[in-house]
């Protein structure tokens, strides 16, 4: 199989035998794990010959009233009840007739939906054995151009969905990110990336809309077009994605804050994991034969290519990619409980993706941005090297308050943690155990969190984090510390 030549973007069409739908295709989810339609709430129906493909019958019914023929826009196997009184399938435009025929319509399998490596096959159905063998026989030929694809008798190969290399075109290219101003690779897939895992690392994707998802480890974005059922895989940060078939431009749901100072800081922390990925070698790697390819084989090739690339990169870059700080939508937090207050912030415990987190809300960012940015920058070393994970930044849109989201540690507020662990990090004054003498010792362990109550400048009078006036150490001239130690771990 050859990759499409995309020197002239206006002529490239990933599915030249199909037309772009005149209306959005809403009866298919972008997440194969969804059980209910994200548009109408109806329970999805399963296709007859695949264990994972689903569709919404109600939304399909609405869709069919607005098109002339399903075969113009989809590569799909379907059947209608032979007892249908109209005998014309779904080729007419009259809504009442379409609805009558729809009651007899059954989707057998979508050929444009990639589910998962081991499930992207035509599954046997005992109740519809005759139909099953008809589909298997039909798969020897391209459903769109009728070209012969497969003549062998390999049973495993016969079960797999095969796409004609002339009717389904894959293309890679580089584009300049409007955020980082650096080139980032893109692979244009001629099918709907229906699954929930990242093609590069196999981790679970984060869904940001009904046709967008991304891997927060790899910073790879998957942007689907609901008019063409195609998918763009973008290996880096950018704000827009264009469908190669219908040329529609989609705004990518941002994982950044929209605040220039914060976004610049976040972008400087994020490594360009795949900026130098050689997608120009993709053509040679995905060749199967001159007639067809399997979507599962292409995705496995992407995975293999990304893993090989990562193995050639410095270890420190890969470690950084696993500890990225990110912009987190505030709506993703549940079970929010206030646990402490400070002059410039409030501390909350919350649940985020089934894990306990702490977030510190900074009041009125415009007046207190130096406190928030100081807090964020002071944690930048911790993001990469410390045990306490800094997940990211969020914002309460109603109150316009910015927040720093961190890993939850069961010790709670720092001064409580000190009560049980203090002797391992600082020294008590034996003459008066109420006071502290700061001093180095080889017996102490590294703190799991930054020690912020001590300045790096002996002339500072106020704390650089909370602006509380420093207290003087009792038995050391010139040593000061901030008593306001409500830094949450």
Image: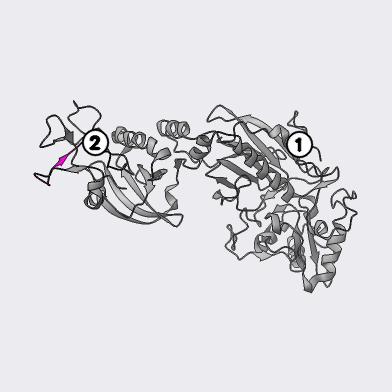
Quadrant in the rendering for residue 43: bottom right
Tell me residue 75's x, y (percent).
78, 53
Tell me residue 258's x, y (percent).
45, 36
SS assignment for the magenta stretch, majority: loop
Tell me the magenta residue range.
430-443
Tell me residue 79's x, y (percent).
80, 65
Tell me residue 386's x, y (percent).
38, 41
| Colour scheme shown | one colour
Cα–Cα span, label 2 and label 1? 59 Å
Residue 283 — which label?
1
Tell me, yes or no, whether the highlighted magenta stretch contains residue 439: yes
What is the quadrant of the N terminus in the image?
top right
**Mark 2: which secondary structure?**
loop
The residue furthest left is 431
Residue 440 — which label?
2
Upstream in the sequence, badge 2 or badge 1? 1
The vertical placement of 88 against 189, above or below, is: below
Compare residues 251 and 481 and report the one nearer the observer.
Answer: 481
Please give left or right for residue 245 compared with residue 271 in the image: right
Compare residues 179 and 311 and report the one nearer the observer.
Answer: 311
């Amino acid at each position: 199989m050859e990759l499409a030549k995309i020197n002239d973007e206006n002529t490239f069409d990933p599915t030249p035998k199909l037309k772009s739908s005149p209306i959005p295709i809403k009866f298919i989810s972008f997440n194969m794990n969804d059980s209910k339609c994200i548009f109408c709430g109806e329970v999805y129906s399963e296709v007859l010959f695949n264990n994972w493909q689903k569709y919404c019958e109600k939304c399909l019914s609405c869709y069919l009233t607005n098109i002339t023929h399903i075969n113009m826009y989809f590569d799909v196997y379907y059947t209608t009840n032979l007892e249908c009184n109209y005998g014309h399938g779904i080729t007419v435009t009259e809504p009442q007739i379409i609805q009558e025929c729809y009651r007899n319509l059954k989707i057998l399998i979508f050929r444009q939906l990639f589910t998962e490596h081991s499930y992207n096959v035509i599954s046997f159905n005992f109740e519809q054995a005759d139909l099953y063998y008809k589909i298997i026989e039909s798969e020897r030929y391209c459903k769109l151009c009728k070209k012969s694809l497969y003549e062998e008798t390999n049973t495993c190969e016969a079960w797999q969905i095969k796409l004609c290399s002339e009717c389904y075109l894959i293309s890679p290219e580089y584009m300049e990110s409007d955020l980082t101003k650096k080139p980032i690779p893109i692979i244009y897939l001629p099918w709907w990336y229906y699954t929930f895992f990242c093609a590069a690392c196999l981790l679970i994707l984060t869904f940001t809309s009904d046709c967008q998802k991304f891997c927060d480890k790899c910073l790879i974005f998957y942007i689907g077009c609901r008019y063409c059922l195609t998918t763009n895989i973008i290996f880096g940060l950018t704000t827009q994605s264009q469908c190669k078939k219908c040329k529609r431009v989609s705004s990518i749901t941002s994982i950044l804050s929209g605040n220039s100072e914060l976004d610049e800081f976040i972008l400087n922390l994020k490594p360009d994991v795949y900026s130098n990925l050689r997608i120009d070698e993709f053509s040679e790697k995905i060749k199967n034969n001159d007639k067809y390819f399997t979507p599962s084989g292409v995705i496995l090739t992407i995975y293999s290519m990304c893993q090989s690339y990562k193995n050639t990169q410095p270890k420190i870059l890969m470690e950084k990619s696993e500890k990225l700080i990110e912009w987190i939508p505030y709506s993703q937090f549940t079970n929010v409980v206030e646990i402490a207050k400070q002059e410039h912030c409030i501390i909350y415990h919350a649940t985020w993706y089934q894990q306990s987190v702490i977030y510190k809300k900074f009041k009125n960012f415009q007046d207190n941005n130096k406190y928030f940015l100081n807090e964020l920058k002071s944690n930048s070393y911790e993001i990469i090297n410390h045990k306490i994970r800094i997940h990211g930044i969020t914002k309460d849109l109603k109150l316009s308050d910015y927040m720093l989201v961190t890993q939850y540690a069961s010790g709670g507020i720092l001064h409580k943690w000190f009560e049980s662990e203090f002797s391992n990090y600082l020294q008590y004054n034996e003459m008066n155990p109420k006071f502290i003498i700061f001093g180095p010792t080889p017996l102490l362990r590294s703190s799991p969190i930054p020690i912020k109550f001590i300045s790096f400048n002996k002339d500072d009078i106020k704390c650089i984090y909370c602006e509380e006036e420093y207290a003087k150490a009792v038995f050391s001239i010139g040593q000061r510390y901030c008593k306001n130690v409500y830094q949450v771990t």
